[in-house]
Amino acid sequence: MPNAVPDCYNPFLHQVDSREPDPYNIAIVGWEADRCSVIVSERGTFYARFGEIYCRFGIADGASSFKWMNHSGYLPCLVTSFRRGMVDVEICHFCNKVTIAGQDYSLLYSRVRKTNRGSDPLVLPANPSADLVRLSPPPATIRPGETEVEDFVTAVDQFGGSAPWPSAEEMIAQGSWDRNFDRMRRYWDDRLSRIVQLEKLPDPRLADAFRAGHIYQLIMLDGNELHVGVNAYRQEFSHDTIGMLVTLIQCGDLELSRRLLDAHRAPLVAPMDYPDGNYKYPWPWTIYLLKTGDVDFVKSNFTVIKSIMHSSANQATGPGGIMRKSYALDHLGYWLVDNWSMLTGLAAYRVLCERLGEDCEAAWALKEYDRLMNACNRRLEQVSKREGIRYLPAHMLHGQKDCPTKDSRSAGWATTLHFGRWPWECYMLGARQEGIMLDLIDATYDWGFDQSRNALPPHTFGGWPGWCTSYNAGFAFAALRGDRYRSEGIRAYQFMIERAMNGPFSWWEGATEPKPGCLWEGEHPAKGSGSCPHMWGDSFSRKILLNSLIDEFADGRVIIGRGVPEEWLAPGCEIRVTNVPLQDNRRFGYHLIAEHDSVQINFIGDSPAGEIVLDLPGFEAGCLPNSSKSVVLQPVENASKSNSTL
């Protein structure tokens, strides 16, 4: 298996540390493209070098509750704070990349800050259980009102190198905790400056989650491999790779995206029979081509893209010409997700071929798309009439009652609504959409939420089964193409932040109900499965947040506000989004200001290639010339919530 972890790390895969009171509450710090990031718990305990280093801080023993967050809201510096007697304590961890004698290392910097709020002097050592290299004087007496800091450093990653670990003297020579923190902050702020800037949102937590998630994704890279997790999923899955790549491209990290596309010039391998990754293989190449105009680079891989598409089309061997059986939902079946994935791949391939001047291939893709869409609609109409159902089942041949995902707390019914990508992505790609697959989108959400109404709170789709998943926000993607739930992606993301995190902006792939008495303040699932953080799921959340605010059609039009909640247009609310990548290296954005009886939108940056489509809830959808600089909108009673006629 590629990147197999050492035996010493295996005990930590898919499991947690029973020495921790809330063992499923974990997150990571690290550096871009390191091999093994550092796992950190809510109490400041950390695990490094695939579990070779374990360090807890005795000062945290006995604390009754903890606050836990990213420094500055988004940086990969995890801050645990708590009260120990009359002392306020903070434990902070971050990594910085250094070069010593020609070898790159990731050094973990740890700080324990203690402020005496009492009236008596005291001594309170940090008491790390591991032999860390000390950067500060030993603990001494802390007078009332004074603060003492203990700083430490340890080497945690070699970026695949084989040189000896640095000595204590070499690590001390790299400078103080503060000096390295400043370097770390500058690095990540520079990396973030290249992507979409969510400068103002009515819920600023979402902007921090967006930034933190992008950083976690970069840390999770192993060279040019897009890993999904640290404590699990340390290999590439085909559909995960495709989804994470598209999110990176749409967020504007185009230089990295080109490098990763270059590293994936071959059919993608899935550890299980998940063919949907290869079915969608042209999609990231198409989005990259549209954003950059990098024709030569994409054309250099056209032979591979063409081969994968034709091979995938030959797998339409199911009843009536639908896609073959697969394990797409971890059970063997004729899954709607496979058919939607193939339709997405064909729609993307057509656009790519048109841009490259491959007219015959574009015509072939259009013909195959129409054939498969018609076959899917016919098959689902048969199921609907035979079983009397008015929703889109996960299986192409029968309703949900016969599926392995029928539990009322199972998110299986919603999986197709995003993993397949067809409703929103094919719409944005300009593909024809009609029939039962389009008509029943809202009805499917109605049916699914009705099934879980007495088992789950609003804005969670459930788990496997369970409370929530890292995919929760992404399950609302099809709703952007419907009417009644168009803002559900943002609301589901907010639910994840409020009630489903097991680390600061970190989610398990699957999570159970919150644990009563969790030491980390707030609601946090008692257990999780998969990995935490789980970056494929996180990429869904970041993408639907961005696409709810702004997205671009393949023809160059830009759509603004499709998934914005109505409450975000209350007087005084502002949305400012900038540096959004558009076609041919344009960067665009807008500043929306909601007033008492109107909404003003000022456009920022390069003019889009096509019209600006305004589709805010409570306002009639409409189009503006691409040269427009601003617009003032008046609310309309009973305004259409659909832009399907645009």
Image (cartoon, grey):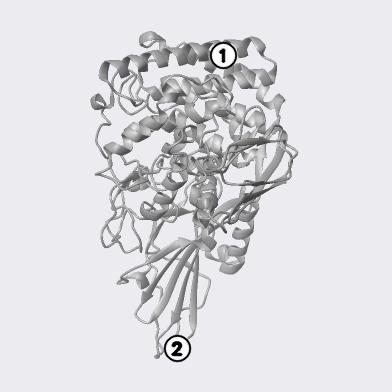
How far from the left and from the top, in percent, is residue 95? 53, 57
Q: In this view, does 297 lie above or below 480?
A: above
Q: What residue occupies the far front of the structure in this picture?
A: 637
Q: What amino acid type should be assigned to the residue bearing mark 2?
A: Pro
Q: In this view, does 623 lie to the left or right of 308?
A: right
Numbered mark located on residue 144 in the image: 2
Q: Position of residue 151 (x, y in %)?
A: 50, 71
User: Callout 2: helix, strand or loop?
Assistant: loop
Residue 426 position in % (x across, y down): 53, 25
Q: Inspect this view and state whether residue 202 appears.
A: yes
Residue 57 higher or lower than 344, as above or below: below
Q: Quadrant of residue 338?
A: top left
- Type of residue at label 1? Leu
Residue for point 37% across, 64% down: 43
Is any atom of residue 108 visible in this view? no
Q: Quadrant of the C terminus?
A: top right
Residue that carries the numbered disc 1 in the rendered image = 366
Of 135 and 260, the residue lying toward us: 260
Q: Residue at x 45, y 85 (%)?
A: 142
Q: In this view, does 152 lie above or below 217?
A: below
Which of the pair 290/443 is nearer the observer? 443
Can you name the residue that lies furthest to the bottom here? 120
Mark sitting on residue 548? none
